[in-house]
Image (cartoon, rainbow, N blue to C red):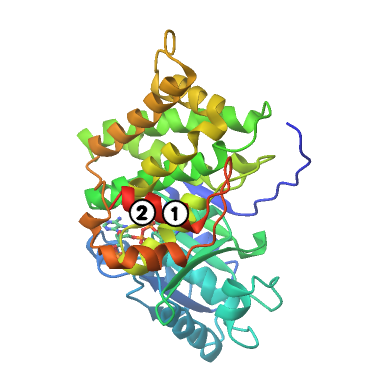
Amino acid sequence: MKFDFEFYNPTKIFFGRNAMDNLENQLENYGKNILFVYGKASIKKIGLYERVINALKSTGKTVTELSGIKPNPTYTQVLEGARLVRENSIDLILAVGGGSVIDCAKAISVSAFCEGDPWQKYWVDFEPLGNKTVPVGAILTMAGTASEMNAGSVITNEAVMIKEGRVFTPEVNPEFSILNPEYTYTVPKIQMVSGVFDVMSHLLEQYFSGEDDNTTDYIIEGILKSLIHSTRIALENPTDYEARSNIMWCATMALNKITGLSKEQDWLVHGIEHQIGAYTDCPHGVGLAIVSVPYYKHIYKYGLDKFVRFAVNIWNVAAVGLTKEQAALAGIEKMADFIKEMGIPTTLREIGATEDTLEKIAGSIEPGGGYKYVTNAEILEILRECY
Ligand code: NZQ
Ligand code: ZN
């Protein structure tokens, strides 16, 4: 490993079937006023809403609810939450749901006491956090983003058609997160595989960069193998506890900083997906899967050895007798097969993008990349390839 780094992740994780037994104890650490943030109907269907309300009542809390947080949470909802925090002197924002709910809770936390327009300040100008925040706690119901153990917050500003991610300092991490893999049993299949590919993409955005001998790359390979193995089991049997646990922990590990330590990183697949999401509202991981195959075919020659390593170590490609290019491409094809095996759409057309928006989407993306600097014109080419 060539680079110096600092590692700090302050989220306390409670993991397992009995993880919720810790909720009341955690709540005791905060003041009386709780903003309970959740999505649409899922937490009510699985009995989690009632469980949380009972915990809040038994610990004597005063509860304000903010429900209906959308997948791809919107800035309007952030501002609504910020208003509720101020009006109700909120002491803790309790987010119960997937990445969207937790991201929204973090955005509310940083926005409530922000002077000026938080969107402009934090998601456009990327100013350092300069105001008081409110603690966030999370109960996770779907595996994918790692929002439960990071300081990321991805928000869609509908007025300007921009979906932007911001990674804050660790003080914005959830202070505690409760992860019970059983809660993920009811996640619809398309959301489940979207989450799985999101995890894979987080790992690849960090893996496909740099050429040094890096322990982090070995950690990433281990997580990738566990993820692929357990996903196949969970697709066969959605209530396989062991497989669901592995997927959930893979997800958390894939973006809690550990898999990025001492690494240059890419993140352009995410940059492209966020704008596809702004225009189509597709599930995040679905957009990532569609773009990844043409994207990696576009850049693999610039990081050839790493792509060969990916093919051999992750997909068991027998490289003997193949050129490096053939082996690298075989690895990308194996990934494409896995995407199909999971039943994820493979074209932008299938998720409702129209041909006339491709230029707008490409033009709204900040160019960049890892092994190769990818321009807006190349991004448009990639979008056309997967249209
Ligand atoms: O609204 P409800 O009823 O809760 O339904 C949700 C939603 O429709 C449903 N769901 C969640 N848990 C369920 C369930 N349905 C049945 N049973 C359960 N147990 O699943 C749907 C999707 O939920 P969402 O929270 O949107 O999914 P995900 O966790 O994939 O989050 C996606 C968002 O996170 C952002 C994405 O861009 C997207 O906006 N990301 C956040 C990151 C971060 N904080 O670091 C990084 C990621 O790269 C990502 O960009
Ligand atoms: Zn992601």
SS for callout 1: helix
Q: Is residue 12 above or below residue 200?
A: below
Distance, label 1 to label 2, CA atoms, is 6 Å
Residue 119 to residue 165: above or below:
below
Q: Quadrant of the N terminus?
A: top right
Quarter occupied by residue 151: bottom right
Residue type pointed to by label 2: Leu
Residue at image mark 2: 383
| Label 1 packing within 10 angstroms: few (<14), some (14-19), many (20+) | many
x%, y% of residue 322? 42, 13
Q: Residue 50 in the image: x percent, y percent?
A: 31, 67
Specify the quadrant of the image occupied by residue 42.
bottom left
Q: Residue at x 41, y 48 (%)?
A: 198
For mark 1, what is the residue? 379
What amino acid is at disc 1?
Ile
Q: Residue at x 76, y 38 (%)?
A: 3
- Relative height, residue 61 to residue 371 (above, below): below
User: In the figure, is residue 127 to the left or right of 345?
Assistant: right
Marks 1 and 2 close (CB-CB < 8 Å): yes
Q: Nearer the viewer, residue 301 or 282?
A: 301
